[in-house]
Amino acid sequence: MTGDQTSPQTLTTAVDPVELAQKIPQLAERQIVQGTVVRVDTEGVLVDVGAKSEGLIPPAELSREASAPDVSVGDRIDVMVVQVEGEEGNIILSQRRADFEMAWRRVQQAQQTGKILHAMVVDKVKGGLVVDLGMRGFVPGSHVDLSQAKGRRFEWFVGQSIPLKVLEVDRPKGRVILSHRLAVEEERQKRKGELLATLQEGMVVEGTVKRLTDFGAFVDLGGTDGLLPISEMSWTYIKHPSEVIRRNQRLKLTVLRVDREAGRISLGLKQILEDPWQKVGGHVRVGDIVKGKVVRLVSAGAFVRLGDLDAFLPIAEAAEKRVNKIEDVLRVGDAIEAMVAEIRADERRMQLSVRKMERERERTRVKEVLRQQEEESRITIGDIAGALLQQAVASATVTPAATDTADRNGEEEVPSGS
């Protein structure tokens, strides 16, 4: 085979120039294509878009300034064809215009499908917020959800990425109106549904206290709010939730009830704490005298704080005499003593009685008086008997001594030597 001959294999693999030209994509102005960055310099960015020649993105058409282009060799980027043939035969491309066009398409699609977008808040203006969607978007003040904002001020959102629902798109006027409030509500409902599907009664969950009310607290569980009633915060009576918890406090809680149809979750805090009624029998017994502080008055009596539990003092047991109103004998904050009249730990109930305590003390005093009188009576009889006995003994002792003395005195003295 001579050197100028072509092998069959070469003939088979040879590419027809016409066929090759047909495979090269035909580009049209304003068309968006994807290409690979092959060079980055001060003149711009050279991009291979699969055409017969490479395309050039001038510095002014980059998404960022040429001094700090946001592309590197090998990156795959979207570009818009500005001019099919430039002055030097290159295809002129624009990354900036491609981003702008794709942003409009993304916004229009989100409006049609109801998709939630996320965008950065770049400014607070009169009447609302300005966001960057690749173009300017406006969020009216009535559509800003301030529940998460510190101080409930629009300024807090600047620099934050927020979820948004597209309300209106007017491309000829370059206007996009969005709602932050609707997006937050939709995301909240979605998380709520997911959370309700997984929660079970008795589970221990963690949450953050978001709001205090007179009847309890609302706790954010990370997808929805649950209610922590004031009655489930402590084993003892509290007048307001602020006595036990504070806003933004992180808590461990027990799930008490889950109403999936109504979307309600009831939580308990005291169930996490040690139950004082389980050990009450080891510290207090019926008949003991205890000291406590009145924490609440009701028409039927008073609740008395005894350490970490509350006992009940019925109005009929609040004094020895008849009491018409509990306020006549007690006030909140009074320190009192009472007798433990009944303990029902399984029912978490302890009943006190001042009346029984006073009667018991009166009986004790009467017994003491009677005992003293009895002792005094015994002492008096003993003293009398002892005195009589002493007198008898004294008489028996003194009489013979007197006689002996008389006899001795009556004897004649015999002189010595008679």
Image (cartoon, grey):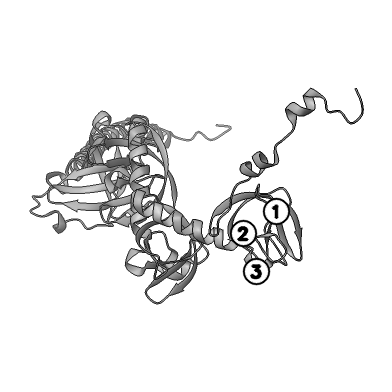
Q: Which residue is mark 3?
A: 60
Label 3 vs label 1: CA separation? 18 Å
Label 2 vs label 3: CA separation? 18 Å
Mark in front: 2 vs 3? 2
Q: Which one is in front, 5 or 274?
A: 5
Residue name at image x 82 percent, y 25 percent: 7
Which structural element holds mark 2?
loop
Q: Position of residue 309 (x, y in %)?
A: 32, 42
Q: Earlier in the sequence, mark 2 or mark 3?
A: 3
Can residue 156 be seen in the rendering of this structure? yes
Q: Is 128 on the left or on the right of 122, as rendered? A: left
Label 3 Cα neighbours within 10 Å, binned few <14 / some 14-19 / many ≥20: few
Q: Label 2 amino acid?
A: Val
Can residue 246 be seen in the rendering of this structure? no
Q: Which mark is residue 170?
A: none
For the C terminus, which image quadrant? Answer: top right
Q: Which residue is mark 1?
A: 54
Q: Position of residue 177 (x, y in %)?
A: 37, 65
Q: Label 1 amino acid?
A: Glu
Q: Which residue is mark 2?
A: 84
Q: Is 40 on the left or on the right of 117, as rendered? A: right
Q: Are marks 2 and 3 in contact (CB under 8 Å)?
A: no
Q: Position of residue 351 (x, y in %)?
A: 21, 38
Label 1 Cα neighbours within 10 Å, binned few <14 / some 14-19 / many ≥20: some
